[in-house]
Amino acid sequence: MMNRRERENMITFISRMRGLQEQKLMVMTDAEVEHIYEATYREHEHTE
């Protein structure tokens, strides 16, 4: 289980990189946020 700060950081990163609204991400489960974060991070890693 992730802590609150970690979740906030993930949501901020996802919203900046994918252009998603933070409000939509805040209602998702930790597992959903983590899945989207990991996919977004991998995409970002490969584009640099």
Image: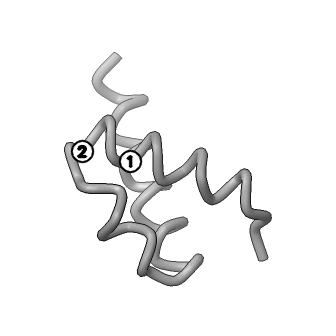
Residue beneath the point at 30% across and 70% down: 24
User: Which residue occupies the foreground of this view, 39 or 11?
Assistant: 11
Depicted 30 relative to depicted 47: above or below:
below
- Give percent across and percent down for residue 46: 35, 29
In-image side of 42 versus 9 (left or right): left
Residue that extends furthest to the left in the rendered view of this protein: 19
Q: Secondary structure at mark 1?
A: helix
- Identify the residue under disc 1: 14
Q: Secondary structure at mark 2?
A: helix
Residue that extends furthest to the top in the rendered view of this protein: 48
Depicted 26 relative to depicted 7: above or below:
below
Could you say which disc has been placed on residue 18 in the image?
2
Quarter that holds the N terminus? bottom right
Residue flagged by tag 1: what amino acid is it? Ile
- Give percent across and percent down for residue 32: 46, 77
- Give percent across and percent down for residue 16: 32, 36
Q: Quadrant of residue 30?
A: bottom right
- Give percent across and percent down for residue 8: 59, 53
Q: What sort of colour scheme is used for the picture?
A: one colour
Q: Quadrant of residue 3?
A: bottom right
Residue beneath the point at 63% across and 59% down: 7
Q: Residues within 10 Å of mark 2 (few under 14, many from 20)?
A: few
Q: CA distance from mark 2 to mark 1?
A: 6 Å
Quarter that holds the C terminus? top left
In-image side of 46 versus 21 (left or right): right
Dots 2, 1 in contact, CB < 8 A: yes
Could you say which disc has been placed on residue 47 in the image?
none
Residue flagged by tag 2: what amino acid is it? Arg
Depicted 38 relative to depicted 31: above or below:
above
Residue beneath the point at 46% across and 55% down: 37
In-image side of 4 versus 32 (left or right): right
User: Which residue occupies the foreground of this view, 28 or 43?
Assistant: 28
